[in-house]
């Protein structure tokens, strides 16, 4: 690197040893907790409608990221599960639209939650784009056949 150069060496992140080590999982978990707190204030008549739907989709994102981790032995299965996680993240954003439209959340709350889920979607897409990186660290042996 030359003096005064704006080029930086590529940052290396430690290899994740568990799905809970994944930044994507950590952020989805935090965002899911935020959804649960937000929906506690929804009207009683929405507890089994909108609140249930947005909670389900938010939970699904983190669960599918964890499931993708378990499937990283097979690149196609890994990507497929991440595609499902991305779908659920976008669905969560759609439910946020409904909460905003019904004035259950403020515009500021909407922006904060929406930005968070948009970021998670970007992280999931990044994992899909770098699937080979994640899958190459998978165990070599499929012990399910023993």
Image (cartoon, rainbow, N blue to C red):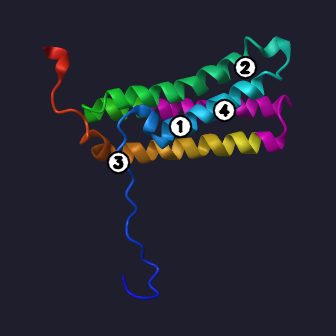
- Which tag is nearer the camera, tag 4 or tag 2? 2
Between 112 and 20, the residue placed more toward the observer is: 20
Q: Which mark is residue 26?
A: 1
Residue 109, position as x, y percentages in the image: 79, 40
Would you call the spot at circle 2 few (<14 residues within 10 Å), some (14-19), or many (20 or more)? Answer: many
Q: Which range is magenta? A: 83-109
Q: Which mark sits nearer the N-terminus, 4 or 1?
A: 1
Q: Look at the picture and state if 136 lies above or below 3.
A: above
Would you call the spot at circle 4 few (<14 residues within 10 Å), some (14-19), or many (20 or more)? Answer: some
Q: Which mark is residue 130?
A: 3
- Which tag is nearer the camera, tag 3 or tag 1? 1
**Residue at position x 86%, y 31% in the image:** 103
Q: Would you name the residue on which mark 2 appears?
A: 51
Task: Please tell me whether mark 4 sits on a helix, a strand or a loop.
Answer: helix
- Which tag is nearer the camera, tag 3 or tag 4? 3
Q: CA distance from mark 2 to mark 3?
A: 34 Å
Residue 76, position as x, y percentages in the image: 28, 33
Give left or right: position of 6 versus 79.
right
State yes or no: discs 3 and 1 in contact (Cβ < 8 Å).
no
State yes or no: discs 2 and 3 in contact (Cβ < 8 Å).
no
Between 58 and 86, the residue placed more toward the observer is: 58
Residue 28, position as x, y percentages in the image: 56, 35
Residue 119, position as x, y percentages in the image: 58, 46
């Amino acid at each position: 690197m030359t003096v005064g150069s704006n080029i930086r060496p590529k940052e290396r992140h430690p290899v994740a040893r568990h799905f809970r080590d994944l930044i994507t999982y950590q952020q989805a978990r935090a965002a899911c907790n935020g959804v649960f707190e937000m929906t506690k204030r929804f009207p009683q008549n929405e507890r089994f409608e909108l609140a249930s739907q947005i909670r389900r989709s938010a939970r699904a994102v983190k669960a599918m990221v964890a499931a993708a981790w378990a499937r990283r032995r097979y690149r196609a299965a890994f990507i497929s599960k991440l595609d499902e996680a991305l779908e659920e993240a976008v669905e969560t954003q759609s439910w946020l639209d409904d909460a905003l439209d019904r004035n259950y959340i403020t515009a500021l709350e909407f922006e904060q939650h929406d930005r968070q889920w948009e970021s998670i979607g970007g992280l999931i897409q990044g994992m899909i784009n770098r699937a080979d990186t994640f899958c190459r660290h998978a165990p070599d042996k499929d012990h399910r056949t023993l």
